[in-house]
Amino acid sequence: MSAQPAGAAAAVPAPDAAAARPPARWWRLARRLLAAAMAVLVAGFLVPEPGRIPVEGATPRDWNPRSFWHEPWGASGVHQGIDIFAPHGRPVVSPVPGIVLFQGQLPMGGNVVGVLGPKWRVHYHAHLADGAAPPRFVAAGTRIGAVGSTGNAAGKPPHLHYAVVSLLPLPWRYRPVTQGWKRMFFVDPAEAMQVQR
Ligand SMILES: [Zn+2]
């Protein structure tokens, strides 16, 4: 205060009566809900993402690392995942602990299973041999299906199409490539699997 020039205090507007009032109850509630939502959001990032190859017995030799974002790629333009080749019927296991968000049939994916795992990432498994329902809660390694060639993989060698989608946009991952904005959502599966080649 002593540092202020004389007369400066007069220029400061009177505190607004409404602003000085304690926060309304709804605002306190909203803040509490926001804090809870933030805690859940942060908790999702604290769950370790152990990462593993979602095909039993598969090794990094069973897919082409350059197939992620390879183009041109059919109807999707770029390949938003990797294809892990394995014999028909080989168990497909969840790469992460999580919750089975969806399971069903899609025109391109055939029989698909989506697992919500750590870091708010959905692990998408397509072309499964059968549509058997996996358990709702899975650990890393829980069987969720079998390798097949359903959907637009019909007639091709059996493989698992594996993609990892972040529900939260990751803007720093934008790349000046075809459909580069989608790189804010599609994570390189090799990164999620923590595979060193
Ligand atoms: Zn694929």
Image (cartoon, rainbow, N blue to C red):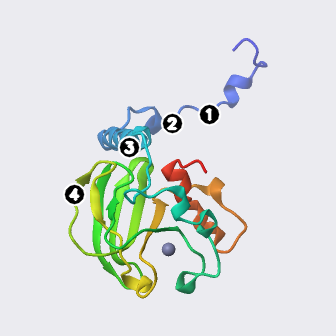
Where, by quadrant of the figure, is residue 1 drawn? top right
Where, by quadrant of the figure, is residue 112 drawn? bottom left
Q: Amino acid at mark 4?
A: Arg
Mark 1 or mark 3: whose residue is earlier in sequence = 1
Looking at the rendered structure, the secondary structure element under dot 1 is: loop
Please tell me the numbered disc located at residue 5. Answer: none
The residue pinned by badge 4 equals 136
The location of residue 57, given as percent across then percent down, is: 40, 56
The residue pinned by badge 2 equals 16
Note whether 49 is above or below 76 in the view shown.
Answer: above
- Nearest the viewer among 171 and 22 is 171
Looking at the rendered structure, the secondary structure element under dot 3 is: helix
The residue pinned by badge 3 equals 34
The location of residue 27, given as percent across then percent down, is: 36, 42
Q: Residue furthest right?
A: 5
Q: Residue at x 79, y 19 (%)?
A: 5
